[in-house]
Image: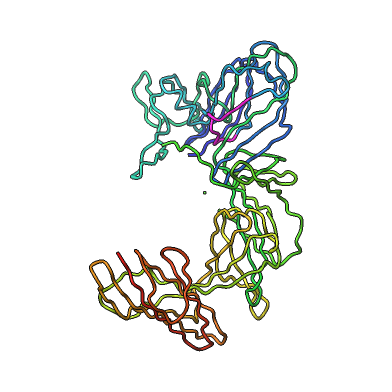
Amino acid sequence: MKMFYKPLRQGLAVRVLLALTSCTLVTLPLAQAEEKSGISASESVSLTIYNQNFGLVKDIRAVELKDGINYLRFEDVAAKIDPTSVSFQSLTAPNSVQVKEQNYQYDIMDPNTILSKSVGKEVKFRQHLPGGQIHELSGILLNSPQVTIADTAGNTIPRYQGLVVKTTNGIILNPQGEVELAELPEGLVSKPSLLWKLDATKAGQHKTEIAYQTTGLNWHCDYVAIANADDTSSDLTSWVTLDNKSGGTYKNASLKLLAGDVHRVQDNAPRMYTMMAKAAESQPQFVEQAFAEYHLYTLQGKTDVNDNETKQLSLFSANDVPTKKLFIYEPQPIVYNVYAGDGDTQKVRVKLEMQNSEANHLGMPLPKGKVRVYKKDQDGALQFIGEDTIDHTPKDEKIRLYIGDAFDLVGEHTQTNFVQVSDRVQRISYEISLRNHKSAEANITAVEHAQGQWKILNSSMPFTKKDSKTFEFAAKVPANGQVKVTYTIEIRV
């Protein structure tokens, strides 16, 4: 159903042209608008965007108020505003302005809404016939042109239907032509608006702050790491991606990004990615500071955040970050079996590890995000070699990225013996076979897990106990060679 407005001046009335299946004319008399205080254009807008799909908007405006009761309408508001979060205050004289009422008006003036709110009122249809003849039909509108139905998932879906009009001659279904209404239904607005009833004891111009929360504002971090030839260092670039689906546009806005998991009470969205080659380190666009138990990143300068727009801003760039490549063989958690069996072959994982420290050209709190890793081939072309996500990472903590499985490294885990020493004690023997089909030596860490009270009775290689359930063997596997690790563990359950 195509719809449009075309206002036409005629005396003291406004005619609005609507199109349903054919042209529809609505005649609307001009309503006497209540006197409202003037509000200037925005002096400054500040955005604090949380990485939980909401944001805090603060808008500074100059307002001319008279002594006594004032009505103030603010139309430049995000469509997805949380009306319960709105705050209005005078910065010029905070104690001289009191908010008596606060209203959020969101019933938008569109053809379907106008007709839906005119059910039970008289309407007039006018058809233009061939030869310049005009046929008119008057009656009472009995239904709305739009209803909502629920799908199988419980979601509401709009469905359009024909109009039904009761005339003196009977019921008319789907009347065609221009439709004329005597008046505009009350309570409709051209765009979502905030309306305040203010009581001012100081007349004149006030500098005011309007603040509210809105959903549809989100940000996330994406990282690009370019590893060198031997994976001993990486160039790391971080990008902030802003996604604005709030239904509002914020011009020349100051921007802060809050990283952390803010607790919110819950009532019962495309990404862009940019890959950059190694570039000289420069001053970051954002300045980081600790705030409460979170971290704030403040943009130096201002930016436009337009509705239905995805914007990327560089957070930082660090070159030659020391990097360590790890080969990790970690079979699935052990299920102790009275019978020894065939070996369990698992992939050897490839991980890259970095220390988030100033000495390593980092040392700032890193927001959670996805890290994509690239590396140059023999022709000098960058190739994608894997990706992983990191959580919010404080400074001086390690980043460990799982980027894929090694093609030429193989691990095999075999239970070789089982002895039931007593009702609660078991003694099991294992063999770990680590095979290297590469032309260079590989350091592989075999990670083992145990349950209950355990101790290693004997092993062919020293091990490191990492915690109450984990121990590791660090093996140097020669090129085109193999290393076997055997051990016997006693478990008390």
The residue at the far left in this view is: 423
Q: Quadrant of the C terminus?
A: bottom left
* Residue positioned 48% across, 35% down in the render: 20
Asked which quadrant contains residue 390, the reply is bottom right
Residue 489, magenta (yes or no): no
Q: Which residues are magenta?
A: 78-88
- Percent coordinates x, y for residue 221 in the rendering: 60, 54
Whether residue 361 can be seen here: yes
In the image, residue 282 lies at what x, y percent? 76, 58
The image shows residue 25 at horizontal and vertical percentages of 53, 27
In the image: residue 227, left or right of residue 390: right
Above or below residue 355? Residue 55 is above
Q: Give residue 410's quadrant in the image.
A: bottom left
Q: Measuring 41% from the left and 37% from the top, which residue is drawn there?
A: 268
Picture residue at 55% right of the left edge, 26% below the top: 104
Q: Nearer the viewer, residue 134 or 317?
A: 317
Above or below for 205 versus 244: above
* Whether residue 128 is situated above or below residue 464 in the rendered picture: above
Q: Count the numbered circles shown.
A: 0
Asked if the magenta segment contains residue 82, the reply would be yes
Residue 132 showing in the rendered view: no
Quarter location, residue 73: top right
- Give the colour scheme of this rendering: rainbow
Q: Position of residue 275 (x, y in %)?
A: 65, 63
Q: Is residue 285 above or below residue 335?
A: above
Q: Is 295 situated left or right of 418 in this image?
A: right
> Which residue corresponds to the image point at 67% horizontal and 14% vertical from the top-left?
200
